[in-house]
Image (spheres, rainbow, N blue to C red):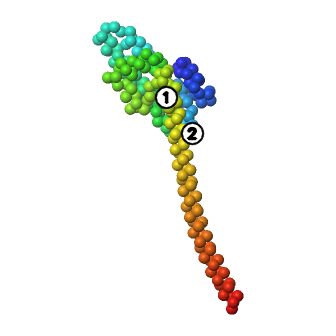
Amino acid sequence: ETNLGYELEQTYSPERIVKQHYFKDGSAVDFVIKLPNELLLPIDSKFPMEVFTPYAEEVDPSLKLRKRQVFVAAVKKEIDAIASKYINPDESTIEFALLYVPAEAVFYEIVFSMREDDLVNYAQRKRVQLVSPNTLKLTLSVIEHWVRDITVNKETREILKRLNTILQDGKKLTESFGKLGKHISNVQGAYSDSGER
């Protein structure tokens, strides 16, 4: 959590980082980043390192396999908890959250050495993105661009909607001027006839 906080402080101004953000149900995520449009990005650092270390240090193949299964189960449990507690669009979060893996070696192990356990795909199906110290900034940068694109798209749609309204109002005004012109022309004709008589 301390490492994650330090890395976030290197990327964002203090007013955009909220530590221990509480949701209405009382659950608290380690950090949220305030994104444009009042959106929140939850980031959790509760990674089960205490289960990884025995697996990494084990030399006996059969015990290592069992400890690996315990580690995989612990990571999946953490992913499930993040997905159920911290992804909450009703409370202004975006549609996914980040799980901070605190060491590059652990991240590498999950992504490359544990492919058959499919933790990365499992997390993505639950809308949780695994990030390491080295991939955190890149991931945050991509999210910032994505949110900006969404904002621009929404603003563009709003502008197009307003332009369409102006166009419709312009058509109605043109029709009204046409009718008014006919009325003025009729009145002018009646006036001229009356004057001649």
Q: Is residue 163 above or below residue 133?
A: below
Q: Amino acid at mark 2?
A: Asn
Please, what secondary structure does the residue beneath circle 1 have? helix
| CA neighbours of label 2 inside 10 A, class few (<14), some (14 to 19), many (20+) | few
Q: In front of the other: label 2 or label 1?
A: 1
Q: Quadrant of residue 70?
A: top left
Q: Is residue 92 visible?
A: no
**Is label 2 in a helix, a strand or a loop?**
helix
Q: Earlier in the sequence, mark 2 or mark 1?
A: 2
Is any atom of residue 59 visible in this view?
Answer: yes
Q: Is residue 193 above or below residue 57?
A: below
Q: Could you say which quadrant of the image residue 68 lies in?
A: top left
Q: Residues within 10 Å of mark 1 (few under 14, many from 20)?
A: some
Q: Residue at x 62, y 77 (%)?
A: 183
- Which of the labelled discs sits on residue 37, or is there none? 2
Q: Position of residue 9 (x, y in %)?
A: 59, 23
Q: Is residue 122 above or below residue 106?
A: below
In 3D space, how far apart are the residues under numbered discs 2 and 1 (Cα atoms)?
19 Å
Q: Position of residue 39 (x, y in %)?
A: 54, 36
Question: Where is the C terminus found, in terms of image quarters?
Answer: bottom right
For label 1, the residue is: 139
Q: Position of residue 123 (x, y in %)?
A: 40, 28
Q: Residue at x 46, y 17 (%)?
A: 103
**Residue occupying the point 53% across, 33% down:** 144
Number of marks drawn: 2
Residue extending farthest left = 62
